[in-house]
Image: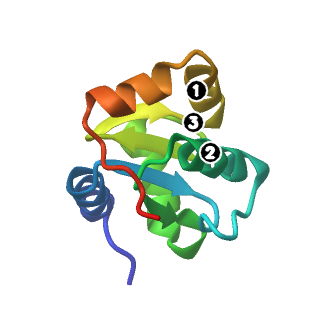
Amino acid sequence: MSETEAETKTRIAGVVGENDVVLFMKGTPLFPQCGFSSKAVAILDHCGVAYESVDVLQDMEVRQGIKAYSEWPTIPQLYVKGEFLGGSDIMMEMFEAGELQETLDKQGVAKAEG
């Protein structure tokens, strides 16, 4: 039995609310399953922040639900302190302009360990 859209939205909101930085992606940071997700991981790793990732390929409800949650049609999707920032193209534009690092610093996001 699959969960309802409301249950999926609540679950997504929980993940977004509990983590400073969340990347909904295809695959995992170690094994991204598409070029856009790979690019998003590389950007976050370069910024040196700690982040949670959610593999939408492992959860069809989240794969569809995240698009409705953000009203954004594509994956990956990046959230910082509960706010949707965008997909890999927006991440790249923000990164190249220095805005992504600035946003992460302003929000007081924890640095990655190691």
Q: Going 36% across and 48% down the picture, which residue do you hit?
A: 21
Residue at 22 percent across and 59 percent down: it is 14
Q: At 25% from the left edge and 37% from the top edge, which residue is drawn?
A: 108
Q: Which residue is mark 2?
A: 40
For the residues bearing labels 3 and 2, Cβ distance under 8 angstroms: yes
User: Can you name the residue that lies furthest to the bottom here?
Assistant: 1
Amino acid type, mark 2: Ala
| Mark closer to the observer (3, 1) | 1
Q: Which mark is residue 10?
A: none
Q: CA distance from mark 3 to mark 1?
A: 12 Å
Residue type beneath disc 1: Phe
* Quadrant including the N terminus: bottom left
Disc sitting over residue 95 in the figure:
1
Q: Given this view, does label 3 or label 2 mark the residue nearer the observer? A: 2
Q: Earlier in the sequence, mark 3 or mark 2?
A: 2
Whether label 2 touches label 1, CB < 8 Å: no
Neighbor class of circle 2 (other Cα within 10 Å; few <14, some 14-19, many 20+) is: many
Q: Which mark is residue 87?
A: 3
Nearer to me, 3 or 26 = 26
